Image (cartoon, grey):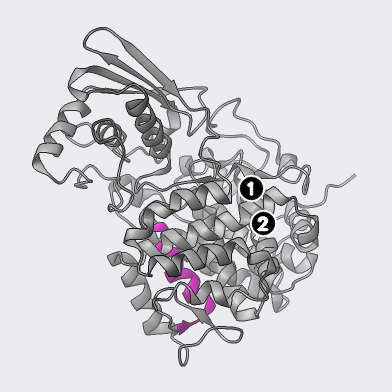
């Protein structure tokens, strides 16, 4: 019996998803996606690259007077200008991405950079309710995560950046759902998005910052895929698994042969992409980042901070630090195309620096600029602190371990008196619910462009989003008084 093509099956799932049938934990997680993406987007809006993205959109895609609500276009956060929906998703998405504090699924994909800005822009323009937005977000996140799960490491092995490559699929599904497309229409949107996908890792390998715009540009293309499907355009039903399709192009095989895996054998079952839809939820495995550094460093900072406090560590008494991580986390962006180390031995993400800083300071500030390149100053701008961090950094040994899950570091600290302390994560520690993420996000309040009281109103509005008749209040609260 011939199998139903993947895009068709995913389109059926996304179109038929009903809010009242979603488990409470899934609705809660969708609210957390909105709260997290918009919060870090508000903080990131002041970055020079975010400002450049807004200027580009305003120059080419400004629409009429400022206003909120249904109709042509959507609203730029902070700015308040009315621009095209795709333009709003692009500019807002750059702000979410720019400091590396977005959400993360299996380290190398970041659904919230694309799906939340596109979902909010579409929901605003279409006049959709909060329930409709949340349901569409769940549909898009689930499509992206399922399509990406087993295939993520193999994509950068072929020179492509995984997050926009898979994110465009989820973005298309969310947008198509909010446009009211039926199962056939959503399937066509996903198929067209598969044809529009692409993004290179060369910039990350060489130290360029084009990755700040990559997901946002993919969001534009995903929204266009849905808009074209709404006009009757069709994609190939087998766009994902076909001999000349998405998986062959971006992983080198349409039969599940993999170049790399985080753990386990180099073989995937494409049938698992659609297995147990509506019963097994990949969205629950999405993690949240708050530190301005790549995802694989996030649990390192959390673990080091906890250990420093628990064991009352004195940096001058430390002889050696051994950090074990998944081997792919130490060869970013890909074992085939790793970034050459800097003269001080630092690689992409500056993991040793982040670890040393956290052990000395007890934590890492969330309101610093993104730290990923060895040339970045980082938070240790004071000469004394910088010298202490540099000295301790030389005592850090990083081991790439085959078999360790991603986001699951193990840290062993040897003291000069011979005592050793060890701590480890297992990969699920940062998979927070709404309440936990909202609590952590309050660390950003001093850097927000809106008043603390207004931000608390925003968080409360997101918490009640499933009861809201529209998303207008969410958008309004992103604007300064």
Q: Are marks 2 and 1 in contact (CB under 8 Å)?
A: yes
Q: Which residue position holds label 1?
A: 283
Q: Which residue position holds label 2?
A: 138
Helix, strand or loop for disc 2: helix
Q: Residue furthest front?
A: 453
Q: Is residue 384 magenta?
A: no
Q: Quadrant of residue 312?
A: top left
Seen at 31% across and 71% down, the residue is 52
Is 416 drawn above or below residue 273 in the view shown?
above
Q: Main secondary structure of the magenta part?
A: helix
Query: Which mark sits nearer the N-terminus, 2 or 1?
Result: 2
**Magenta part of the protein: which range?**
82-98
Seen at 55% across and 34% down, the residue is 428
Q: Quadrant of residue 341?
A: top left
Q: Residue furthest top?
A: 418
Tell me how far mark 2 sits from mark 1, CA to CA: 7 Å
Is 359 drawn above or below residue 240 in the view shown?
above
Seen at 21% across and 37% down, the residue is 342
Q: Nearer the viewer, residue 367 or 455?
A: 455
């Amino acid at each position: 019996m011939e199998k139903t093509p993947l895009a068709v099956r995913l389109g059926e799932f996304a179109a038929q998803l009903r809010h009242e049938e979603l488990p409470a934990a899934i609705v809660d997680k969708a609210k957390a996606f909105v709260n997290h993406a918009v919060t870090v987007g508000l903080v990131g809006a002041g970055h020079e690259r975010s400002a450049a993205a807004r200027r580009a959109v305003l120059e080419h895609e400004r629409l009429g007077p400022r206003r909120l609500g249904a109709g042509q276009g959507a609203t730029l956060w902070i700015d308040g200008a009315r621009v095209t929906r795709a333009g709003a998703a692009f500019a807002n998405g750059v702000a979410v991405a720019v400091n590396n504090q977005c959400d993360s699924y299996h380290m190398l994909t970041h659904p919230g950079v694309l799906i939340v800005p596109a979902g909010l822009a579409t929901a605003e323009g279409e006049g959709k309710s909060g329930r409709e937005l949340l349901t569409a977000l769940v549909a898009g996140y689930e499509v992206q995560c399922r399509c990406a799960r087993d295939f993520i490491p193999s994509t950068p092995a072929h020179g492509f950046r995984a997050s926009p490559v898979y994110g465009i699929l989820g973005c298309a599904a969310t947008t198509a759902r909010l446009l009211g497309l039926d199962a056939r229409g959503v399937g066509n949107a996903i198929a067209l998005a598969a044809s529009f996908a692409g993004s290179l890792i060369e910039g990350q390998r060489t130290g360029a910052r084009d990755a700040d715009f990559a997901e946002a540009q993919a969001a534009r293309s995903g929204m266009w895929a849905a808009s074209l499907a709404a006009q009757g355009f069709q994609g190939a039903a087998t766009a994902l698994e076909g001999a000349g399709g998405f998986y062959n192009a971006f992983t080198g095989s349409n039969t599940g042969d993999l170049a790399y895996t985080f753990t386990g054998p180099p073989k995937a079952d494409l049938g698992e992409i659609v297995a147990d839809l509506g019963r097994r939820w990949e969205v629950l495995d999405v993690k949240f980042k708050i530190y301005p550094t790549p995802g694989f460093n996030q649990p390192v900072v959390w673990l080091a901070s906890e250990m420093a406090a628990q064991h009352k560590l004195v940096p001058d008494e430390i002889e050696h630090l051994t950090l074990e991580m998944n081997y792919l986390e130490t060869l970013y962006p890909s074992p085939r195309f790793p970034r050459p180390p800097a003269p001080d031995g630092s690689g992409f993400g500056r993991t040793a620096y982040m670890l040393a800083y956290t052990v000395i300071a007890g934590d890492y500030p969330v309101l610093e600029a993104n730290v990923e390149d060895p040339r970045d100053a980082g938070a240790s701008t004071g000469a004394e602190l910088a010298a202490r961090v540099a000295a301790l950094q030389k005592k850090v040994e990083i081991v790439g371990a085959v078999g360790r899950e991603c986001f699951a570091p193990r840290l062993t600290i040897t003291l000069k008196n011979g005592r050793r302390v060890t701590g480890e994560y297992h990969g699920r520690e940062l998979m927070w619910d709404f309440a936990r993420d909202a609590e952590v996000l309050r660390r950003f309040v001093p850097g927000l462009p809106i008043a603390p009281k207004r931000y608390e109103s925003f968080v409360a509005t997101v918490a009640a989003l499933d009861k809201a008749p529209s998303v207008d209040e969410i958008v309004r609260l992103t604007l300064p008084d």
